[in-house]
Amino acid sequence: MNSSRPTSSAAALPGTTGPTRRPYAAISCERPSPCCARTRPDPQPSRRDGRTARPNPAATQPAASRPGSETGTRDSRQREDATLDQRSRELRKTIIEVLHAAGRGHVGPSLSLVEILRVLYDSVLRYDPARPDDPNRDRFILSKGHGCLAQYVLLKDKGFVSKDALFGFCRYDGCLGGHPTGDIPGVEMATGSLGHGLSLAVGMALAARINRAAHRVFVLLGDGECGEGTIWEAAMGAAKHGLDNLTALVDYNKLQSYGDTEAVSGLEPFAAKWASFGFAVRETDGHDVAELEANLAELPFTRGKPSLLICHTVKGKGLPFAEHNPKWHHKTKVTDEELADMVCCIEGRHA
């Protein structure tokens, strides 16, 4: 894919004037915490440098010759016995440590999407932490904004925000709140009022098409969020315009705030619904890094269609007592003893 992408989602169209984004350097100047001070990324096993656009080898291959270009042809459902590797464990430990420091947070939703975000930031998205407003960057929207604790951990991991900012999560003098806002480096839009992220992503993808820009747009949805009518209105628009530069992912953990998603919304047959709206759909194990990478390396799944990857996950993944447990949708006041117990569970040392 051509790495020359001349436009930004925040910039005005050619020949017009429009608002500019607030300079990131000014965000934290009035706050005691160095909220958005950028740091060097932590050493990590990554297959790509975030500063360099990586060509998509599937982009020049006809869709018909690629495996899994239609619904259900690559369906690796979430496996209950999936083993977490060390990087996934470390990311989860950091989530728990920040939760402990803050005394609050949506821990269940954050733990279910760790591998999805990890693969996006490690292997898929094109970005430069030193230039978060780079017009050539891929756009990513976390539509299920309550899962932002996991995104903040990845933003710190990649050097967008500092450790002090991360551990100031949900503090009155910090800038990383319980839902993401657009003045955080690496965050495109404020989200959290569920159902709007796909509409935002469709607008960004359509703007890129109009401006002949080559950057891609990604949006991560929650399964409970897909009960919102605005999701399906946006889906129709994406298909109508043939936005194959748009990829939606769904964190399908089968739970929402108060119970089973299927009992609340009746999403199934989920993949078939998305396909009927004009998306090229695949399903995968949302905790299998290799499977996620394999699918996302083949974008778009079908030329001329927006892509959707349904990621089968476990809410609270990594903490046996929190998995599939709606009581762990949001957690407050984690004691030192509870923190130690959680770390043991994540590291696999719990009896």
Image (tube, rainbow, N blue to C red):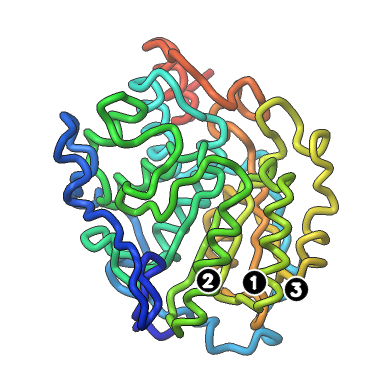
Q: Earlier in the sequence, mark 1 or mark 3?
A: 3
* Residue in front for this viewpoint, 126 or 324: 126
For disc 3, the marked residue is 70
For the point 46% across and 22% down, which residue is it? 342
Amino acid type of disc 1?
Pro
Give the SS element for disc 2: helix
Q: In the displayed structure, would residue 20 be above or below residue 153?
A: below
Give the SS element for disc 3: loop
Amino acid type of disc 2?
Ala
Q: Residues within 10 Å of mark 2 (few under 14, many from 20)?
A: many
For disc 1, the marked residue is 306
For the point 54% across and 24% down, which residue is it? 330
Amino acid type of disc 3?
Glu
In the image, 241: left or right of 159?
right
Whether tag 2 and tag 1 are in contact, CB under 8 A, the answer is yes
Mark 2 or mark 1, which is nearer to you? 2
- Residue 224, image quadrant: top right
* Residue 108 coordinates in the image, percent (x, y): 56, 31
Alpha carbon distance from label 3 to label 2 = 21 Å
* Residue in front for this viewpoint, 41 or 220: 220
For the point 38% across and 38% down, which residue is it? 90
Mark 1 or mark 3, which is nearer to you? 1
Q: Residues within 10 Å of mark 3 (few under 14, many from 20)?
A: some
Q: Residues within 10 Å of mark 1 (few under 14, many from 20)?
A: many
- Residue 238, image quadrant: bottom right
Q: Which mark is residue 205?
A: 2
Residue 13 visible here: yes
Q: In the displayed structure, would residue 250 be above or below residue 180?
A: below
In the image, 3: left or right of 314?
left
Whether tag 3 and tag 2 are in contact, CB under 8 A, the answer is no
Residue 79 visible here: no
* Residue 206 coordinates in the image, percent (x, y): 54, 74
